[in-house]
């Protein structure tokens, strides 16, 4: 039995550490990878808790589908728009972590001081085995006592599909955003957002554009000419 | 006979309603004949009723229907005729009929004639119902109804601002009196549990002396308003804005005497309270004196007669106050004739002078309108108390009464007032009919009135001259013996002939002296009225300005009340109450706007708030355990 | 400690939930916040499954199943909204989306 | 009753009309008006049938209709009428017909919506007077509120939104308190008897503690006092009246205010007699203040409608004055004042509507001499003015005198002070009458420049030719206004006849109420019967 506890603790530790990593990574792709790690650990814990079917669903739905979706969306978002690279909000972090710690402390106290009492049900290891295994039990229950919720869930999923189609359709009458990018950047390294202290450097370089439809600029550094439309506008106004 | 009693008031009512609804489009001038016939019918029907009362000495009544059946407050509409009512019936229908006939001539050509001949019979109806009521509430109803008719008729020429204001003033001032009268009725009901005359009069003694006094005074308050006593007589002179026949019928002969009638009607109550009688006599004599002094200074012929009316009403009031009940009613009757005559005569003068009312622009009219002159002279002499005309007998009896019932001070003032009466009456006669012609003969062509107007004058003049003999000899006449039945418990005083002769002598002397002074002043010009006025200085000014009563009311009551109302509206309503209401609304809006700032739109803040909430709730559970909600 | 105690998975569940919450509080990238929400949902699942295990019940597992289904639906819609947002505003910064401010 | 559900038919026939209009989307305006008129008339006919079926000697609820709705919580569909509600119901059905006639030409804009709102309002008002289940009553009470607020807010004049919101919030504040009180009473009755009911008749049998009675009485009273409106809850009334369209004012004055008085008689008195007696002196004081205050403030108004609105405050003070004197005269007085005020003030608002429709102003100083070119109008105006200032022989006097008498019996000072209104009401009404109907138009020369007046020029022809129908919003010369037309006369005549009838012979009306009022007074000793 000690091994079980040990494995559980190990899995828990990894899950927590990767969860912390997820919220601290600046790059969202890294966060996503950390989240995958957490979810895999959770799935493993599910198996330990005799929820094999759920573990499979967890892997398939979360790790497989949702995370892939997230990554797809991440790819569609312009990396320069990622806000964490811009100005930080230290107070927000302090308050966030503070509140988290207090709540964690309170809940820990609650967990340690309270016991949850309930009548044990029939689905212990033997019961589940007798019924033919975890999946069979879930299946039987779902389609006997939970028919209505299952139908409702189906409806929700259908609605979500339609909603996603609606949200994802192209806006024809949408005017081009005034914030469209005007300066092209060729990145030598991975993408970075423009930081305020880079703008003087850009101005100092005073590079003239070549004729043609595209701006082609050679940069020595990834951040050298990175700027945004707003700064362009500001520049236009000052001139 | 009692079964068709209801016809007496019904006929004028029917005429009034028909004329009002159909008059404008269908009847037009025919309305005058309908109204006159209806009143004539009432008059003819009243005669047998009067004769029956004379012969049987029994009151008759006819129950019509129950008006208000509110639990123990059960008010019937019952017609009731006793000696007092019968007298009033004849006066009202008789004078009313003559005024109707006169009005046919006077109102000739007025486009609103159908209205006039609708309101006038309506007034006759109301007045008849007033005198025939058998309980105080029905009396009050028609008390108000005659006020309505008075309002409508004073404001008959409603396009004149002055007429409209006078009508309003008359109604409102009367309502001040009605305020007291109404409370009096409430008090009667609460005290006696009924407001029927018979029931109340049977139980008068059951109430305390104070209550009786208060009731009597409250009833007198009504009379102060309606019978134009001090301090509420201000409406009556203004009421002269109405057509002159209206002044004759309503504001001289009948309606204004309703107050006196009510006091006489409530004789069993009023006579029980010496204090109330005292107040009535003081108010009455004061009214008589003040009005007489004002009358001497007026130049408008109708105003002179109007103030004379007020003064004579004062005579009636203090007659009642001193205990000369029958004398008061006697004077009421004679006054109805001679004052009606005076008004109609004045109307005839005005008619002949093309609507001129100022005596300073008249003079020497005797030769242009002889019938008017002679009838007016009879009326004036009767009013002034020249023997043997009607006014002499009744007024002399009133003054005699003050002596008989030991009111010496009142007697003295009454004699002075009688002197003033003679002064103003003959002043009017001489200024109007004698002396030089002060009008512009190019513009005004005085002429005698048509026969339809002079015949009522002559009839009234005959009555004004002779009606006094129904009360002859004083305190022992036929009228006294007839009316004594309406005043149970009243005894006719035994007066020595010598006393009668002394009083008659003094009265005649006073009246003749007034005549002589005015003759000297306005015909012989040996006395200058302006000189006397200058001599009296402020006293003359006081009288000429009607003792500043209107101004006093304006400053003391009207303006403060309007200002207070303004304050209530602009401050209490708009600032305090609405301010509170709007203040609550503003507070809510302000609080909400402050809270709205919490809606930053930042998800992080919302989550933060949720987390804080969770911390607080969980923390509370940690600290207080599950006892938190108990 | 030789047997698995309910406190353990409860603590795990709480810790993951709070980490997710802290992420929502501190991060500005909508996508990361979205991931944090997913994490919080998963942490609730742990509690469900854990109690089901503890009391030999199946209801917890079934509820967890529903949670996953709803989370999937939520993911689809949420990501759709984020897509629309980036198309319209060119940003995924939560602080720039303040439409809720009246 | 297994016979005809006459009360439901009466209540819902306007609603049927409203639904027909609602679903006939492209109905022409005239068709809409006719449908509304027919629906309201059907309701009136049913109410008259109800009157015929009504047993005048029975003090209890009659023509009852019960229908199980939510029996577990005591909510049922329960209708019934007694001598208190019958006159008010008939007043309502009649005034609705009149209001629709009065809106015939006056409303040209959104006629369809207007008539729907009007009919909905009719159903709500009738429902208030016939429902005997508090739940149902509350529903109807609120149903009245919304159409009226819409009517003021959409078809009102310049400052209508403010007035509508004020009206709505004021009344809602009261009715929410009432809701709390209803729940409290319901719970208290349940705790006493173990029976869940919201029937007024059953709840009246309950025995509530004095302290409880006080609070719940106050909550009910607050709702009804706002509706009446009693001083100092009256400030919504002038605004609402001034801004509302004519028909809205008629129904507001004619029916909505009566709901307050009716509520006091139907709920407060039978359910909480101890509290009623305890609060009576306070309410009498408020009533007397309302009577005098309303009259005084009416004295200085310059707007016709505002003047009549403040006079309503004064008149409605007599309702509470009568009710809380707890004797027969007071109850009769309160009832007759309510009916009379409905007729008279309704008619006065109609009359103001007549000139407003022609001249587009309600300012008193803009009018004058209307009697010259509008003689019929002037006659009606005079009649209703006199009825309003309490001239005996017209309906106003009977009720007010009884109320004053009742107060005088119990609280002499209150009776005396409220008697002063005879002077004040004459003052403000005649002030208005003189300026609007008498005298001359503002532009005409003064007396002395007009020689024909000195003669018998009472009915001088108007000097300015031209008809009405001038839709300019500038000052319209009052001399050009045309007299009331046949439709307007039709709306005024029934009111005039009833006013005179009640004034001259109120007996039949009082016999109708007598058993119910006697029963109502029983817990208070029933003095005066």
Image (cartoon, coloured by chain):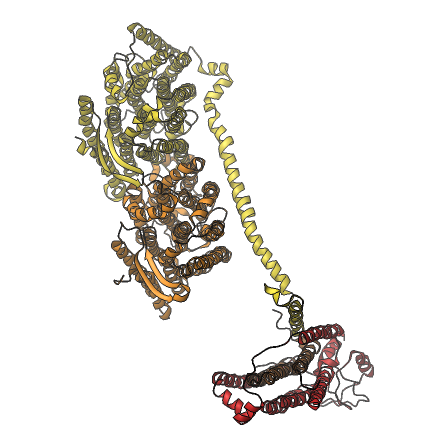
Chain colours: A red, B yellow, C brown, D orange
Q: Position of residue D263 (x, y in %)?
A: 41, 52
In this rendering, would D450 be left or right of B575?
left
Q: Does residue A129 show up?
A: yes
Q: Is residue A231 above or below residue B450?
A: below
- Towards the viewer: A53 or D390: A53
Q: Position of residue B84 (x, y in %)?
A: 26, 24
Q: Quadrant of residue B174?
A: top left
Task: Check the image and name the residue furthest to the top.
Answer: B498
Q: Position of residue D291 (x, y in %)?
A: 45, 42
Q: Position of residue D470 (x, y in %)?
A: 40, 54
Q: Is residue B6 above or below residue C89?
A: above
In this rendering, would B425 be left or right of B31?
right
- Towards the viewer: B71 or B522: B71
- Towards the viewer: B333 or A166: A166
In this rendering, would A212 be left or right of D184?
right
Q: Is residue B512 above or below residue D341?
A: above
- Which quadrant, please, contains the N terminus of chain D? bottom left
- Towards the viewer: B195 or D72: D72
Counting every numbered tag in the picture gives 0
Q: Does residue B352 show up?
A: no
Q: Quadrant of residue A239?
A: bottom right
- Which quadrant, please, contains the C terminus of chain D? top left
Q: Is residue B133 above or below residue B621?
A: above
Q: Quadrant of residue C48?
A: bottom right
Residue at figure coordinates x 51%, y 40% from the top left: B565
């Amino acid at each position: 039995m000690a091994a079980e506890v040990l494995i559980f603790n190990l899995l828990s530790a990894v899950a927590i550490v990767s969860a912390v990593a997820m919220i601290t990574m600046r790059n969202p792709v890294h966060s996503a990878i950390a989240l995958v790690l957490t979810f895999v650990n959770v799935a493993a814990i599910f198996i330990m808790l005799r929820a094999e079917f759920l573990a499979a669903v967890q892997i398939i739905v979360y790790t497989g589908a949702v995370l892939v979706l997230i990554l797809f969306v991440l790819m569609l978002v312009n990396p320069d728009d990622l806000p964490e690279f811009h100005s930080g909000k230290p107070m927000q972090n302090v308050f966030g972590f503070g509140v988290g710690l207090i709540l964690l402390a309170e809940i820990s106290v609650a967990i340690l001081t309270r016991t949850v009492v309930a009548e044990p049900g029939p689905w212990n290891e033997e019961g589940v085995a007798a019924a033919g295994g975890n999946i069979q039990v879930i299946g039987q229950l779902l389609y006997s006592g939970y028919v209505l919720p299952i139908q409702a869930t189906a409806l929700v999923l259908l609605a979500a599909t339609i909603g996603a189609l609606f949200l994802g359709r192209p806006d024809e009458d949408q005017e081009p955003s005034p914030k469209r990018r005007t300066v092209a950047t060729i990145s030598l390294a991975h993408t970075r957002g423009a930081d305020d202290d880079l703008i003087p450097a850009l101005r100092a370089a005073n590079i003239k554009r070549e004729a043609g439809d595209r701006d082609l600029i050679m940069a020595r550094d990834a951040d050298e000419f990175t700027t945004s439309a707003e700064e362009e506008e500001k520049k236009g106004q000052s001139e | 006979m009692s079964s068709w009693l209801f016809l007496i008031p019904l006929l004028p009512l029917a005429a009034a309603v028909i004329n009002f609804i159909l008059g404008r489009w269908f009847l037009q001038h025919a309305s005058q004949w309908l109204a006159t016939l209806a009143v004539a019918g009432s008059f003819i029907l009243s005669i047998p009723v009067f004769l029956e009362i004379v012969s049987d000495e029994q009151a008759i009544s006819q129950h019509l229907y129950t008006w208000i059946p509110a639990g123990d407050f059960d008010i019937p509409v019952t017609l009731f005729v006793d000696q007092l009512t019968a007298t009033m019936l004849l006066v009202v229908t008789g004078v009313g009929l003559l005024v109707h006939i006169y009005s046919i001539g006077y109102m000739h050509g007025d486009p609103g004639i159908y209205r006039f001949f609708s309101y006038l019979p309506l007034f006759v109806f109301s007045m008849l119902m007033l005198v025939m009521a058998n309980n105080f509430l029905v009396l009050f109803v028609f008390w108000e109804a005659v006020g309505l008719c008075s309002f409508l008729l004073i404001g008959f020429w409603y396009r004149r601002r002055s007429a409209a204001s006078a009508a309003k003033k008359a109604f409102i001032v009367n309502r001040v009196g009605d305020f007291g009268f109404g409370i009096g009725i409430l008090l009667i009901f609460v005290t006696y549990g009924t407001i029927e005359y018979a029931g109340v009069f049977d139980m008068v003694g059951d109430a305390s002396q104070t209550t009786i006094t208060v009731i009597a005074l409250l009833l007198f308050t009504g009379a102060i308003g309606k019978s134009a006593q001090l301090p509420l007589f201000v409406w009556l002179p203004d009421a002269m804005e109405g057509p002159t026949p209206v002044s004759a019928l309503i504001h001289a002969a009948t309606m204004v005497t309703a107050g006196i009638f009510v006091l006489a009607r409530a004789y069993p109550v009023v006579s029980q309270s010496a204090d109330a009688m005292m107040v009535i006599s003081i108010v009455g004599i004061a009214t008589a004196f003040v009005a007489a002094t004002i009358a001497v200074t007026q130049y408008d012929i109708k105003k002179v007669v109007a103030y004379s009316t007020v003064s004579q009403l004062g005579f009636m009031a203090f007659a009642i106050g001193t205990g000369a009940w029958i004398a008061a009613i006697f004077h009421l009757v004679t006054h109805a004739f001679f004052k009606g005559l005076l008004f109609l005569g004045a109307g005839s003068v005005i008619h002949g002078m093309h609507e001129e009312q100022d005596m300073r622009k008249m003079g020497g009219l005797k030769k242009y309108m002889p019938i008017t002159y002679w009838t007016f002279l009879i009326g004036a002499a009767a009013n002034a108390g020249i023997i043997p005309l009607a006014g002499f007998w009744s007024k002399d009896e009133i003054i005699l009464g003050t002596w008989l019932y030991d009111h010496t001070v009142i007697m003295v003032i009454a004699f002075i007032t009688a002197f003033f009466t003679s002064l103003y009456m003959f002043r009017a006669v001489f200024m109007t009919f004698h002396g030089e012609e002060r009008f512009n003969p190019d513009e005004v062509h005085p002429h005698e009135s048509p026969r339809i107007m002079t015949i009522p004058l002559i009839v009234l003049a005959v009555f004004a001259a002779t009606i006094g003999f129904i009360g002859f000899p004083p305190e022992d006449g036929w009228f006294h013996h007839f009316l004594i039945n309406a005043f149970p418990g009243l005894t006719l005083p035994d007066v020595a002939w010598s006393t009668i002769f002394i009083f008659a002598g003094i009265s005649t002397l006073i009246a003749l002296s007034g005549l002589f002074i005015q003759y000297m002043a306005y015909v012989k010009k040996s006395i200058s009225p302006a000189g006397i006025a200058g001599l009296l200085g402020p006293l003359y000014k006081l009288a000429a300005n009607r003792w500043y009563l209107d101004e006093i009311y304006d400053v003391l009551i009207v303006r403060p009340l309007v200002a207070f109302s303004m304050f209530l509206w602009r401050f209490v309503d708009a600032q305090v109450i609405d301010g509170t209401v709007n203040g609550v609304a503003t507070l809510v809006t302000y609080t909400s706007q402050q809270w709205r700032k919490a809606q930053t739109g930042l998800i992080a803040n919302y989550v933060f708030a949720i987390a804080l909430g969770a911390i607080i709730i969980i923390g509370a559970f940690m600290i207080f355990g599950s006892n938190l909600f108990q | 400690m030789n047997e698995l105690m309910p406190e353990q998975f409860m603590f795990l569940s709480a810790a993951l939930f709070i980490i997710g919450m802290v992420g929502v509080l501190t991060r500005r990238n909508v996508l990361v916040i979205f991931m944090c929400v997913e994490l919080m949902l998963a942490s609730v699942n742990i509690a469900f499954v854990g109690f089901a295990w503890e009391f030999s019940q199946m209801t917890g597992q079934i509820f967890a199943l529903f949670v996953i289904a709803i989370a999937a639906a939520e993911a689809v819609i949420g990501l759709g909204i984020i897509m629309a947002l980036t198309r319209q505003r060119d940003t995924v910064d939560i602080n720039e989306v303040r439409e809720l401010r009246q | 009753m297994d016979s005809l559900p006459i009360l439901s038919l009466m209540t819902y026939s306007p609603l049927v009309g409203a639904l027909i209009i609602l679903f006939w989307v492209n109905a022409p305006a005239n068709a809409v008006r006719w449908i509304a008129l027919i629906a309201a008339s059907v309701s009136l006919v049913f109410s008259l049938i109800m009157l015929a079926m009504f047993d005048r000697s029975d003090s209890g609820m009659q023509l009852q209709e019960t229908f199980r709705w939510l029996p577990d919580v005591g909510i049922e569909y329960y209708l019934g009428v007694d001598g208190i509600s019958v006159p008010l119901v008939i007043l309502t059905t009649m005034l609705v017909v009149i209001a629709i006639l009065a809106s015939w030409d006056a409303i040209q804009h959104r006629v369809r919506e207007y008539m729907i709102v009007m009919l909905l309002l009719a159903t709500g008002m009738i429902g208030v007077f016939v429902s005997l289940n508090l739940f149902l009553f509350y529903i109807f009470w609120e149903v009245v509120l919304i159409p009226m607020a819409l009517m003021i807010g959409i078809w009102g004049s310049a400052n209508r939104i403010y007035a509508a919101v004020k009206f709505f919030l004021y009344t809602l504040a009261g009715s929410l308190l009432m809701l709390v009180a209803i729940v409290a009473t319901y719970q208290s009755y349940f705790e006493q008897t173990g029976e869940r009911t919201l029937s007024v008749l059953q709840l009246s049998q309950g025995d509530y503690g004095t302290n409880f009675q006080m609070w719940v009485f106050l909550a009910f009273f607050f709702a009804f006092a706002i509706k009446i409106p009693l001083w100092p809850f009256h400030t919504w009334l002038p605004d609402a009246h001034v801004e509302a369209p004519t028909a809205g004012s008629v129904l507001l004055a004619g029916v909505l205010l009566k709901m307050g008085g009716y509520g006091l008689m139907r709920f407060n008195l039978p359910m909480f007699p101890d509290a009623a007696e305890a609060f009576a002196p306070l309410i009498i004081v408020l009533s007397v203040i309302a009577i005098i205050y309303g009259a005084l403030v009416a004295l200085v108004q310059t707007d016709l409608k505002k003047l009549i609105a403040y006079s309503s405050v004064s008149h409605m003070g007599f309702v509470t004055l009568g009710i809380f004197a707890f004797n027969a005269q007071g109850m009769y007085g309160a009832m007759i004042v309510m009916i009379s005020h409905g007729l008279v003030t309704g008619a006065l608002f109609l009359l103001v509507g007549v000139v407003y429709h022609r001249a587009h102003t309600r300012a008193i100083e803009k009018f004058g001499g209307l009697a010259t070119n509008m003689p019929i109008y002037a006659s009606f105006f005079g009649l209703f003015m006199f009825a309003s200032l309490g001239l005996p022989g017209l309906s106003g006097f009977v009720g007010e005198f009884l109320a004053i008498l009742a107060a005088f019996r119990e609280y002499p000072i209150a009776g005396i002070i409220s008697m002063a209104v005879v002077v004040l009401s004459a003052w403000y009404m005649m002030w208005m009458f003189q300026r609007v109907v008498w005298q001359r138009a503002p532009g005409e020369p003064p007396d002395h420049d007009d020689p024909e007046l000195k003669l018998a020029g009472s009915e001088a022809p108007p000097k300015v030719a031209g008809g009405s129908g001038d839709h300019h919003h500038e000052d319209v010369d009052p001399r050009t206004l045309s007299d009331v037309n046949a439709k307007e006369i039709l709306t005024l005549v029934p009111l005039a006849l009833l006013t005179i009838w009640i004034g001259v012979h109120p007996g039949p009306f009082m016999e109708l109420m007598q058993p119910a009022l006697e029963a109502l007074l029983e817990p208070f000793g029933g003095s005066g019967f």
